Image (spheres, rainbow, N blue to C red):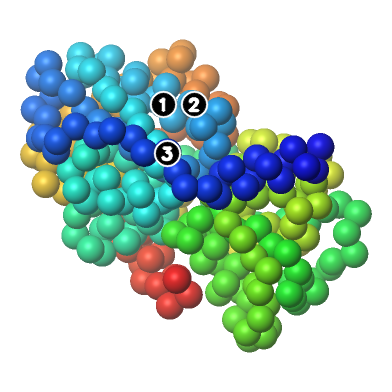
Amino acid sequence: MRLLLLAFLLAACARPPQVALAPPFRPELEGGEVRVAVAGMLSPLEAEPYRVLARGMGEVLGVRVEVFGRRTYAGVLEALRQGEADVGFLCTLAAGMGVEEGFLEVILASQPKTPYRSLIVVREESPYRHLSELYGRPFAFTDPLSNTGHAWPRLAARGLGEGFFAQAFFTYGHDRALWAVKEGLAEGAAVDAVVHEALGLPGLRVLWRGPVDPAPPVVVRKDLAPGAKARLREALLAFAATQEGLEALRVLHLEGFAPADGEAYRQVYLRAKGVLP
């Protein structure tokens, strides 16, 4: 089992597949097309509910929605920056970077059933009781631009030694990071508390909890017309209230979405900026 999981994780860390993209466009949302990028917060199978929400938004609007993924948060940011995507389901820190750099706007914040915060988890039977005891141990991060899966653990470990994360690696998915610990490939992992709760993997124990932060948002390109942004927001809210939308939210451990702006996300990025690669 460990060999199979190791192969899975190595494949996840390999060069991501190339996705052919059409030239950039500016949808009018009237019989046109909307392109939605889904960040790699979860492996493709676990991320399917985000695709359900995106396609449902298109059904409400009466337009075709093309959903595609990128392995990294930086890849999703670049797709939005270049106009290759119009909407993104993105993580908190990466969204804040896009807001700070002036090309993204937050239109909705997710409403998780569990407070959104960083967790560091270990195996239930492991001897570790304090974060300092993980010094130099194999450690699983999720993504370089992850707030919960990378930035907060680095902030928490400041002052505990320069080589604290000497054996750390990236899994590019919170679920993969949890499995890395469960199967003994890492002694600890940094993950999103919402994903941890939603997956409910047995045999793991929370060693450290970070402060509560703004939950991952839905973002759009800032240069979209104001009317288009409003229609996208209202369409997603409408679909999220349907039976199919509620089921997708349930799987993601979300209660729904609420209007939000980007300032709180920008502050998350500014706080984390000093520990990012």
For the residues labelled 2 and 3, the Cα–Cα distance comes to: 18 Å
> Which residue is depicted at the point 24% across and 34% down?
21
Q: Nearer the viewer, residue 112 or 9?
A: 9
Q: Give the image location of residue 255, x and y in percent.
A: 50, 32
**In the picture shown, does residue 210 fall above or below 34?**
below
* Label 2 close to label 1 by CB (< 8 Å): yes
Q: Secondary structure at mark 1?
A: helix
Asked if 239 appears above or below 42 in the picture, the reply is above
Which of labels 2 and 3 is toward the front? 3
Residue placed most toward the observer, 98 or 229: 98
Point out which mark residue 17 bears: 3
- Which residue does the numbered mark 1 point to in the structure image? 51
Instruction: Name the residue beneath numbered marker 2.
Output: 48
- Decide: few, some or many residues near mark 1? Use Cα within 10 Å; few <14, some 14-19, many ≥20: many
In the picture, measured across the screen, residue 137 lies left or right of residue 92, that is right
Q: In the figure, is residue 79 to the left or right of 240?
A: left
Amino acid type at circle 3 is Pro
Q: Give, as a three-letter code, the residue at label 1.
A: Arg
